[in-house]
Image: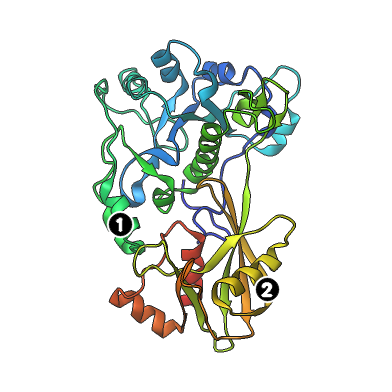
Amino acid sequence: MGRRKSPTQDFVLAGSDVTRAAAWRSRSDLWHHFLSAGRSWAIVVRGADILTTGAGNETRAVRVPLASIERALGGPPGDRVVFLGADVDEFSVASVSGTTLPDVAAYFAWIAPDQRVLAAALGSAMGSGGGASSAPTGPRREDATDHTTWQPRRPGRLDDAVTAGRTRDALREATAGLAGQPEGDFVPLRTAGEFLGAFDIGLALPAVALAQWHDSAPFCSSCGAPTAPGEAGWLRTCTGCGRDHYPRTDPAMIVTVLDDSDRLLLAHASHWPERRYSLLAGFIEAGEGAEAAVRREVFEETRVSVGEVEYVASQPWPFPASLMLAYRARAISTDIQVDGVEVADARWFSREDLNAAIRSGEVHLPMGSSIAHALVRRWLDG
């Protein structure tokens, strides 16, 4: 399945081709129903990493048949799976009643399985002819392969490229030859996201967000008692006081600041790799509107005042739980003064200046999956 086509199509993580079917999450028979259906799969996540196969623009999320997971575990996977959605439209989801679920393909996330169990599940999938797969419409048949000694490789060159602040072409070059085996590699979603199709993005984003949330929320924040997952992985309930806990989302703003000459304001944070510049961004504080946060953050970090603020788009950034709200703002002052602590440098760039700085290596843009990268590229393209 190709990239989605929308006004935000250059925002790599901005959308999803997956129907989440949230009304089914309370069904206790979800796993067993779709296991019996025989054409449902789970992607595999470990923290903010996903198991992928392929390289460059051919990168795909590996999908393991539910039956292979059951065989490897000797039973249901318990609380380490999350229901992500199904091949069904929302109208059909709403029309399901009583005890009937439709015979459609469904998708789950399998969170950080034991390495031996994962190897056994992959071996079971290949050996049975089911085929661990990356195809959106179902598993692709592969030659039988012995995965009993499989170990995921860490794609060092990809991580190094991102750490160095490399641009889109460099990231594509860095992924060439990685994750080439059918069993794949665990790759950070923030770097792999640029190369995944819309269907895989729609699965991977909630999978990564929920995997990190489950790992960070084993105890109740009210009474300290253990929490237990429910609602097919979208809820944790305290076993002591009974309080329900839901995945958190932290709103943050990011802004394209332009002056009257249409120059772009970019900044270099003190903790970033050398020469990386990006748009100004920050978390929206309690009781604060997003537009107010734009004006506050820009002034705090650069002493530049902005007037008009216009909303552009949003993009989830589950590292671990942000929702980036993108804005465009017009500066009413241009003198820059950074604090030297949080922000080490900030500069105004014309398009000619920034293109030259990128070509010379003086400036590295953010990673290609980020909304910052897309916003800067939009401005560069005029």
Hey, which residue is sitting farthest bottom in the picture?
261
- In this rendered view, identify the residue nearer to me: 43 or 6: 43
Q: Are marks 2 and 1 in contact (CB under 8 Å)?
A: no
Badge 2 local density, few (<14 within 10 Å), some, or many (20+)?
some
Tell me the kind of residue under disc 2: Val
Quarter residue 69 falls in = top left
What residue does disc 1 label?
161
Secondary structure found at label 1: helix
| Residue 26 rendering spot, x and y as whole percentages | 69, 24
- In this rendered view, identify the residue nearer to me: 194 or 303: 303
What residue does disc 2 label?
309
Q: What distance separates the C-alpha of mark 2 from that of mark 1?
A: 34 Å
Q: Disc number at residue 29?
A: none
Q: Is residue 377 visible?
A: no
First-in-chain label (2 vs 1): 1
Badge 1 local density, few (<14 within 10 Å), some, or many (20+)?
some
| Residue 55 rendering spot, x and y as whole percentages | 30, 47
Q: Residue at x 61, y 26 (%)?
A: 232
Tell me the kind of residue under disc 1: Ala
Q: Residue at x 36, y 69 (%)?
A: 364
| Residue 22 rendering spot, x and y as whole percentages | 67, 34
The scheme the figure's colours follow is rainbow
